[in-house]
Amino acid sequence: MTKKTKRILIGILSLLLIYFGYKLYLNLTLIEKPGYYDFERSNIQEKIVGDKKVLTEKNLGITMQIPKDWEYEYKLTMGSFIASDPTTNVKFLLRDFREWTKGCTIGLAVENDGIFGDNISIFEDEFNRMNYFKEGDQSYCDYHHCEVFDIRGNEVWKGVREFEETNFDGDIQHVFIAILDNKKRRIYRINSLLSTQVPECQEHLNDFINNLEIK
């Protein structure tokens, strides 16, 4: 092997090491770091299937479905990822709930495992709280109502906060969903506001949860 060939091979190997080292860095720092994942539009693949907009987040390996006419964005309110009906007739659902009669919003945040306090795992803490509730300890429910069920092999931990208004002829609920991914030790947190004036929001939330694919 000539010196020139050796230099070329060394150069190629160096580039490969840089490339795979960079990919490893991304995996360790952007995806698996403790705390909440930062959604970016460039990481989402979108396609229309029938009346649905199918969204695949490439880094997380999850697929979501929303109505094809809905829009999505990223902000710190309600969750990192926000999907909403553009025909919603108020700007702030919770503040303007009396006038809110059209449109729905669903938020999604993804939390990676980490350590807080006295060496307590975020994932283990959520997992243990859910199991204590399943065993009958209602004190682990931080909401007005809680329940646990299973979707596609993942346990779902649901909490509902009721808003009691004496001068409102209807009911408002804030629904919190935590889906525990045991393989990757992630928590997928979904939340949405529901109103008896906009009953289709419950259907949209159920559809979003039931069609969320976690790989």
Image (spheres, rainbow, N blue to C red):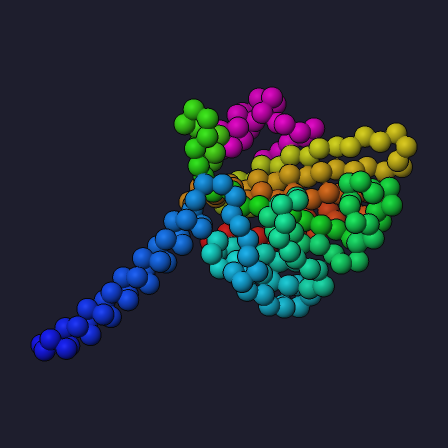
Question: Which percent across, then down, holds residue 29?
Answer: 41, 49
Q: Residue furthest left?
A: 1
Q: Which residues are magenta?
A: 126-149
Q: Quadrant of residue 113?
A: top left
Q: Nearer the viewer, residue 183 or 25?
A: 25
Residue found at x 55% / y 53%: 39
Q: In the displayed structure, does residue 36 sit left or right of residue 184?
A: right
Above or below: residue 149 compared with residue 55:
above
Q: Quadrant of residue 66?
A: bottom right
> Does the stretch in magenta take in 76?
no
Residue found at x 46% / y 30%: 116
Q: Nearer the viewer, residue 61 or 209?
A: 61
Above or below: residue 116 compared with residue 31:
above
Q: Nearer the viewer, residue 79 or 76?
A: 76
Q: In the displayed structure, does residue 30 sit left or right of residue 211?
A: left
Question: Which percent across, then down, holds residue 168?
Answer: 88, 35
Question: Which percent across, then down, holds residue 186?
Answer: 48, 43
Q: In the displayed structure, does residue 67 sit left or right of residue 166?
A: left
Q: In the displayed structure, does residue 4 sit left or right of residue 148?
A: left
